[in-house]
Amino acid sequence: MRHRPAALLILLTCVVAPSAATAAPERPLPPVALWTVPLDGPLAVGRPFEPPPHAYGPGHRGVDLAGSAGAPVLAAGDGVVVFAGMVAGRPVVSIDHANGLRTTYEPVAPSVGAGQAVARGSPIGILATGHAGCAAAACLHWGVRRGDTYLDPLLLLRPPGIRLLPLG
């Protein structure tokens, strides 16, 4: 029975002494951004997204971001340029991204060409003037769609919500 006090001491040491398992948890790393605003500076929405009621209905299939003429326009996410040229007299750049997304930027005098890979935040052209309905001196119309469905581009800038569900 001489060993009982030693065993008791070991048990108390294990219960009272802090261990790595009871140490304060480390803070998680912040999520890595996949998307960025396509203009430098504070986000200034001149006209919000207004989804059309049907494929050919009226609406605003993107957002207008106030900027200044000559400002660099940046790729909102990693992708491949699929179009850089004129559409209905306006300079446009379109980029295909993962998950079937395509972003469109206009009026943008392109500095990239079709087939060119671009990284999030890299310059794709210069903001031009002449966007109808824009209250600022220059506005970037930024659109995004998945297939034939137009989406609100501002949703790309919000981190996804995570919700745990019970099993079963």
Image: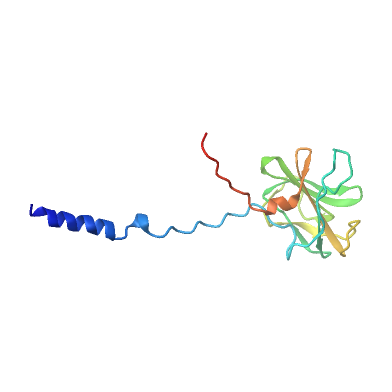
Instruction: Please determine whether, in this image, residue 71 is positioned above or below residue 93.
Output: below
| Whole-percent x, y for residue 159 in the image | 63, 52
Front residue of 87/150: it is 150
| Whole-percent x, y for residue 97 in the image | 69, 45
Q: Is residue 13 left or right of residue 26?
A: left
Q: Which residue is rendered at x = 89% and y = 41% of the image?
A: 57
Q: Which residue is rendered at x = 25% and y = 56% of the image?
A: 14
Front residue of 159/9: it is 9
Front residue of 38/12: it is 12
Q: Which residue is rendered at x = 20% and y = 56% of the image?
A: 10
Colour scheme: rainbow
Instruction: Please determine whether, in this image, residue 149 is positioned above or below residue 128.
Output: above
Q: Is residue 124 left or right of residue 128?
A: left
| Whole-percent x, y for residue 53 in the image | 85, 41
Q: Is residue 155 left or right of residue 83?
A: left
| Whole-percent x, y for residue 164 in the image | 55, 44
Q: Farthest residue to the top: give it.
A: 168
Q: Farthest residue to the left: give it.
A: 2
Front residue of 146/20: it is 20
Count of numbered marks: 0
